[in-house]
Image: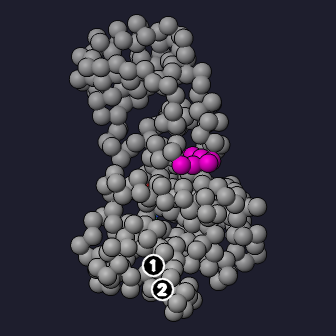
Amino acid sequence: MTLASMQSVLKRYGSCAALDYIDLEIHEGEIVGLLGPNGAGKTTLIQALTGILPVDQGRISLFGDSRNPFSDANKQKLGLVTQEIAVFEELTAKEGLEFFAGIYGLRREEKKKRVAEALEFVGLSAYANKVPHKFSGGMKRRLNIACALTHRPRLLIMDEPTVGIDPQSRNHILESVQKLREQGTTILYTTHCMEEVQEIASRVVILDQGQVVKEGTVQQLIETVRHEETIIFDVADPLGIPLRQVESIAGVSQVSVSGSRITVISAAGAGNLDRILSVVQQHSGVLGIQADKPNLEDVFLTLTGKQLRDREGSR
Ligand SMILES: Nc1ncnc2c1ncn2[C@@H]1O[C@H](COP(=O)(O)OP(=O)(O)OP(=O)(O)O)[C@@H](O)[C@H]1O
Ligand SMILES: [Mg+2]
């Protein structure tokens, strides 16, 4: 069953189309990984899909209802973990969760039970009576996730829930997401991190500049670049490399720079490594070379000509 869908959804900010005629479907039981760099439109898409943000054109359907998708009954079935962490700093973890459970109409015993379950689920039972004021970023995030769970949503939407937190909390969150899916929750998980998507997503939707550039399972997407190989050079002077010249070598399809790394995508077996290396070496010291099997990062690079990891300082 399709739990949520968008058809030709357009949302403009001035002349910028944050959502540029988006089509999307989320089926029951999936973890859809919505992957895209900063500014791709991930948060806008979530806001449109949950009715927070009115769109300019297009059709949105939730739980089979496209006439009144944002009815109270439908909103009850949604859980939203927003990009910005929102927890009550002065209430204890338990009190804050009880507040959210109350909004969803849970009462007394049921509320207590669900709050305890949610705290247990995110691994914060021991902190139930502590105020989040001094929690680490990862603990606040987990509490934030618990807030979206007490009413047991059918569709849980998470906007970059692992940004800026410690690896332990990150792993905990990724495991929790998989556990939720096993328990029957459908999940839309946005991130700019392809490792996360590779780890948990049953289907991937790649978003760039407000458009869906590709979708499929991780395997299907990687298959599209199977005939390519990626060569990464660590160089002393990345700005000195004439990218155009490297790009003009036979077999080379993409060249990009991120920090001190030059990434070259080339047809597999083109036998051009000597030529590429000689151009690179003429202009900079080479500190390391590595050839990678294709991964989602390469899919993105091939489709858009850009590195996904723009948070880490590419240009
Ligand atoms: N309120 C707004 N006013 C004007 N432009 C906006 C507004 N919100 C978003 N945008 C623009 O819309 C585009 C998509 O932004 P959005 O926040 O949805 O991207 P994102 O994929 O969530 O990025 P990030 O990974 O940084 O959270 C960007 O170009 C952004 O500058
Ligand atoms: Mg965002």
State the residue position of label 1.
116
Determine the main secondary structure of the stretch shown in magenta: strand
Relative image position of residue 36 (x, y in whole percent): 50, 48
Q: What element does badge 1 sit on?
A: helix
Q: Which residue is mark 2?
A: 112
Could you tell me which secondary element the residue under label 2 belongs to?
Answer: helix
Position of the C terminus by quadrant: top left
Q: Is residue 30 magenta?
A: no
User: Which region is colored magenta?
Assistant: 200-209
The amino acid beneath tag 2 is Lys
Q: Nearer the viewer, residue 158 or 145?
A: 145
Name the residue located 65 percent from the left edge and 36 percent from the top edge.
220
**In this picture, is 256 found above or below 109?**
above
What x and y, as percent, mark residue 206? 57, 46
Query: Seen from this angle, which residue lies furthest bottom?
Result: 108
- The picture places residue 40, in percent across and down from the top left corner, at 50, 52
Q: Residues within 10 Å of mark 2 (few under 14, many from 20)?
A: some
Distance Cα–Cα, label 1 vs label 2? 6 Å
Camera-nearest residue between 221 and 262? 221
Q: Quadrant of the N terminus?
A: bottom right
| Residue lying at 61% horizontally and 63% vertically, measured from the top left | 183
* C-beta proximity under 8 Å, tags 1 and 2: yes
- Using the rendered view, name the quadrant where residue 161 is placed: bottom left
Q: Is residue 243 left or right of residue 27?
A: left
Amino acid type for the residue under numbered disc 1: Ala
* Residue 185 in picture, x, y percent from top left: 62, 64
Vertical placement of 87 versus 112: above or below?
above
Left or right: where 85 falls relative to 100: left
Q: How is the image coloured?
A: one colour
User: Residue at (36%, 58%) from the top-left corner?
Assistant: 169
